[in-house]
Image (tube, rainbow, N blue to C red):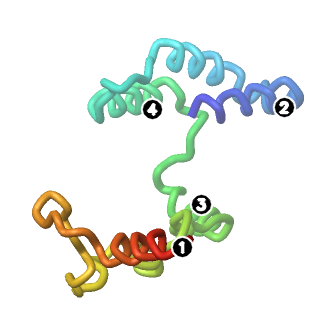
Amino acid sequence: MYYNFLRIQDVAEKNENFLKKFGQDLESLAKILKGFRISSKTNVLDLRKLGSKMKQELTNFYLPERNLSTVEKTVSQMWYLTPPKPAGIPLKRLPPKAYIGKGYTDKGTARDPAVDGNPSWQEIASSFVEESEP
């Protein structure tokens, strides 16, 4: 709303006829908007009060309700809404999360030296090779 008000002020500076027709309404609108502060605590009741205040003071600045249906037909053909597209890849199309599995279930070579103190076959084989070399 504030941005549109600034644009209207720019149009009024450039166009004298627009300024003659809506100059007083622009001044009263500026006073209304300066008095109204939008914050996170602004609720619907505050906005309704703002709307009723604008309706009372800005009689030449808005269209009468009897003309709104005609304007709606014209304006509705000028714009349309499209639903936003989500960013990224949908979760259904992502590959499954990688994880480290159990591995082989063969426990024959898996040893726990704290429980079993016997040497492994690799240790025994390497000791025979060392003894046999001259």
Between discs 3 and 1, the one toward the N terminus: 3
| Other residues around mark 3 within 10 Å, as few (<14) / some (14–19) / many (≥20) | few
Mark 4 or 1: in front is 1
Q: Which residue is mark 3?
A: 71
Query: Type of residue at label 1?
Result: Glu
**Residue 92 shown left or right of residue 82 in the figure:** left
Residue at 54% in and 73% down: 133
Element under disc 3: helix
Which element is circle 2 on? helix
Could you tell me if the residues under marks 2 and 3 are in contact, i.e. CB atoms within 8 Å?
A: no
Q: Is residue 13 left or right of residue 112?
A: right
Name the quadrant of the N terminus: top right
Q: Which image quarter holds the C terminus?
A: bottom right
Q: Which residue is label 1 attached to?
A: 133
Upstream in the sequence, badge 4 or badge 3? 4
Place of residue 125 in the rendered image (x, y in percent of width and height, measured from the top left):
39, 78
Q: Which residue is mark 4?
A: 55
Spatial CA distance of label 2 from label 3 is 22 Å
Give the x, y percent position of residue 49: 33, 27
93 relative position to 30: left or right: left
Pair 3/1: label in front: 1
Q: Secondary structure at mark 4?
A: helix
Residue 14 shows up from this direction:
yes
In space, the residues marked 3 and 1 are separated at their CA atoms by: 104 Å
Q: What residue is at 55 percent from the left and 63 percent from the top? A: 87
Name the element at disc 1.
loop
**Distance of mark 4 from mark 3, alpha carbons?**
18 Å
- Which mark is first along the chain, 1 or 4? 4
Q: Which residue lies under the disc numbered 2? A: 17
Q: Amino acid at mark 3?
A: Val
